[in-house]
Amino acid sequence: MTRLSHIAAGVALLAATTLSGIARADNQDVIDYRQHIMKTLGEQSQSLAMVMQGKAPAENVAMHAQILAVTAATVEAAFKEKVAGGESKPDVWAKWDDFSKRAKELSANMADLAKTAQAGGVDAVKPKLQAALTCRGCHETYREQKK
């Protein structure tokens, strides 16, 4: 085999090994990933609330709203793999159609909020913010209470 063939074979082996490891994340990786997603939503919601209260720079409203929109768009996929654990109740998967519908609504609401923030700033976001953040109803149904 030539040197180039050895390098190509090594790259192919590395890619196959890496990709198979990614495709088969263990259960804790799945739980950790979705917890990171949900934590980001919570932190960005709090940051946006600070902007609305005048405790953080108003010029950051569009940025926080955009981060919420991007993150909300990942929620449904983060829960597709049926892995119980973390703070997720088994009802997430037992009532998948409802959970999925709520995740899609959250994503659409956050996308709309991001567009509103980009176009109109803090004043435009204020009347829409409470309606856009639909977290409570979903958490009451699908999230274990922290102990």
Image (tube, grey):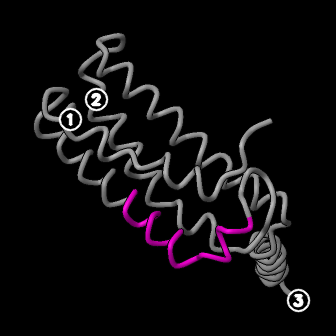
Could you tell me how far apart the alpha carbons at marks 1 and 2 are, in whole angstroms? 8 Å
Q: Which residues are magenta?
A: 90-106
Q: Which residue is mark 1?
A: 125
Q: Quadrant of the C terminus?
A: top right
- Choose mark 1 or mark 3, whichever is in front: 1
**Type of amino acid at the residue the image marks with label 2:** Val
| Label disc, if present, on residue 49 of the rendered structure | none
Q: Outermost residue toward the top?
A: 55
Q: Quadrant of the N terminus?
A: bottom right
Q: Is residue 107 visible?
A: yes
Front-most of 146 and 66? 146
Q: Position of residue 40 (x, y in %)?
A: 55, 40
**Type of amino acid at the residue the image marks with label 1:** Val
Residue shown at 38% from the left, 44% from the top: 133
| Label disc, if present, on residue 61 of the rendered structure | 2
Q: Earlier in the sequence, mark 1 or mark 3?
A: 3
| Label disc, if present, on residue 1 of the rendered structure | 3
Packing grade of label 2 (10 A; few <14, some 14-19, many >=20) is many
Packing grade of label 1 (10 A; few <14, some 14-19, many >=20) is many
Q: Is residue 3 visible?
A: no
